[in-house]
């Protein structure tokens, strides 16, 4: 019985987290498109989500706060680690940065 309860609790937490992720995705899409209507729809979804979280009454499921949304939008514009690595100047074995002119092959 206890195992079933834990399983149901985990499933419900997963559902809430999936909903939260979809709402964050709506905000990112609205920001990228500059769509005020989609932004307002996402705000309505936040209110709906937060009401459900409060009704559920579990402390481990957090409501969506304004600063959470701001962080999502800020992180959306941040380069990934892979992107930063790709754009960084390459270094030779001595630790010196190679210039792109050193790596060019001249064809005749």
Image (tube, rainbow, N blue to C red):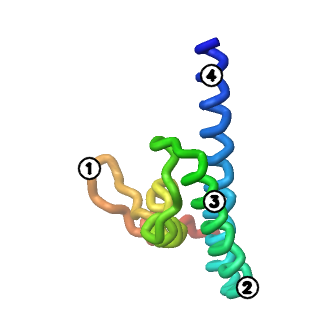
Q: Horizontal and vertical percent for residue 23?
A: 65, 63
Q: Which of marks 2 and 1 is in front?
A: 2
Q: In which quarter of the image is residue 13?
A: top right
Image vertical order of residue 1 relative to residue 57, above or below: above
Q: In this view, does 104 lie to the left or right of 94?
A: right
User: Disc 2 versus disc 1: distance between alpha carbons?
Assistant: 55 Å
Asked if marks 4 and 2 touch (Cβ < 8 Å), the reply is no
Image vertical order of residue 93 relative to residue 24, above or below: above
Q: Quadrant of residue 15?
A: top right
Image vertical order of residue 34 relative to residue 30, above or below: below
Label 1: which residue? 94
Asked if marks 4 and 1 touch (Cβ < 8 Å), the reply is no
User: Disc 4 versus disc 2: distance between alpha carbons?
Assistant: 40 Å
Q: Circle 4 — which element?
A: helix
Asked if marks 3 and 4 touch (Cβ < 8 Å), the reply is no
Q: Earlier in the sequence, mark 2 or mark 3?
A: 2
Label 4: which residue? 5
Label 2: which residue? 37
Q: Nearer the viewer, mark 4 or mark 2?
A: 4
Label 3: which residue? 49
Q: At 62% across and 71% down in the image, what residue appears? A: 28
Image vertical order of residue 34 relative to residue 104, above or below: below
Q: In this view, does 53 lie to the left or right of 29?
A: left
Q: Which of marks 1 and 3 is in front?
A: 3
Q: Horizontal and vertical percent for residue 18?
A: 67, 48
Q: At 43% across and 69% down in the image, what residue appears? A: 67
Q: Circle 2 — which element?
A: helix
Q: Circle 3 — which element?
A: helix
Q: Earlier in the sequence, mark 1 or mark 3?
A: 3
Q: Earlier in the sequence, mark 4 or mark 2?
A: 4
């Amino acid at each position: 019985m206890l195992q079933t309860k834990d399983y149901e609790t985990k499933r419900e937490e997963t559902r809430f987290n999936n909903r939260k992720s979809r709402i964050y995705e709506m905000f990112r899409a609205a920001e990228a498109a500059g769509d005020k209507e989609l932004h307002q729809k996402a705000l309505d979804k936040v209110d709906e989500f937060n009401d459900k979280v409060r009704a559920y009454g579990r402390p481990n499921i957090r409501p969506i706060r304004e600063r959470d949304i701001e962080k999502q939008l800020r992180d959306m514009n941040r380069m990934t680690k892979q992107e930063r690595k790709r754009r960084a100047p390459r270094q030779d074995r001595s630790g010196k940065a190679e210039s792109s002119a050193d790596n060019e092959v001249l064809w005749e």
